Image: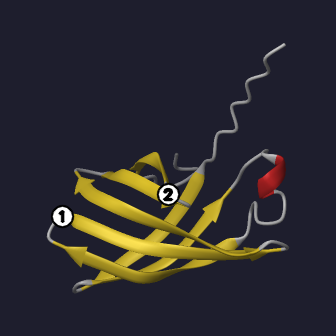
Amino acid sequence: MLHLFDYRRPEIVNAAATGNLLTGTVVSVSAAPWMAETTGRSVEIKDGKIDGDKFSFKVTTENKQGERTAVYEGSVVDDHLKGVIKFRGIGQTLDARRKTSGLAT
């Protein structure tokens, strides 16, 4: 029997740009068992950069297995952040919409 799991990972990205510097936090929420230690935790954006409509930043979390770094790269398109989240060589699509209240996905 094949079991497929759909562990969606909504993220809240609170970011601000000052010149070419991008700062802020990311909060990931997931029902996935491997995310139990870090779900809901606010993590600081590191190495955040803006170049025209392009952005990139890193988020490093720590759990029992050690440090893990995800790299976010993409473009700002209207009120969207579109791009990819790279973690351990695997890319996941990023399509975040600006929200003034509630959870952005």
Name the residue located 84 percent from the left edge and 49 percent from the top edge: 33
Task: Give left or right: position of 62 versus 98.
Answer: right
Relative to 61, is 79 above or below? above
Mark 1 vs 2: CB contact within 8 A? no
Name the residue located 25 percent from the left edge and 57 percent from the top edge: 75
Image x and y of residue 53, in percent: 18, 64
Name the residue located 79 percent from the left edge and 44 percent from the top edge: 31
User: What is the number of callouts on the image?
Assistant: 2
Q: Residues within 10 Å of mark 1 (few under 14, many from 20)?
A: few
Q: How crowded is mark 2: few (under 14 residues within 10 Å), some or many (20 or more)?
A: few
Name the residue located 57 percent from the left edge and 68 percent from the top edge: 26
Image x and y of residue 105, in percent: 52, 45
Q: Earlier in the sequence, mark 1 or mark 2?
A: 1
Residue 89's label in the rendered image is 2
Relative to 85, is 5 above or below? above
Residue 53's label in the rendered image is 1
| Quadrant position of residue 43 | bottom right
Residue 104's label in the rendered image is none
Q: Is mark 1 on a helix, strand or loop?
A: loop
Image x and y of residue 62, in percent: 73, 77
Q: What element carries label 2?
A: loop
**Residue farthest top in this picture:** 1
| Quadrant position of residue 54 | bottom left
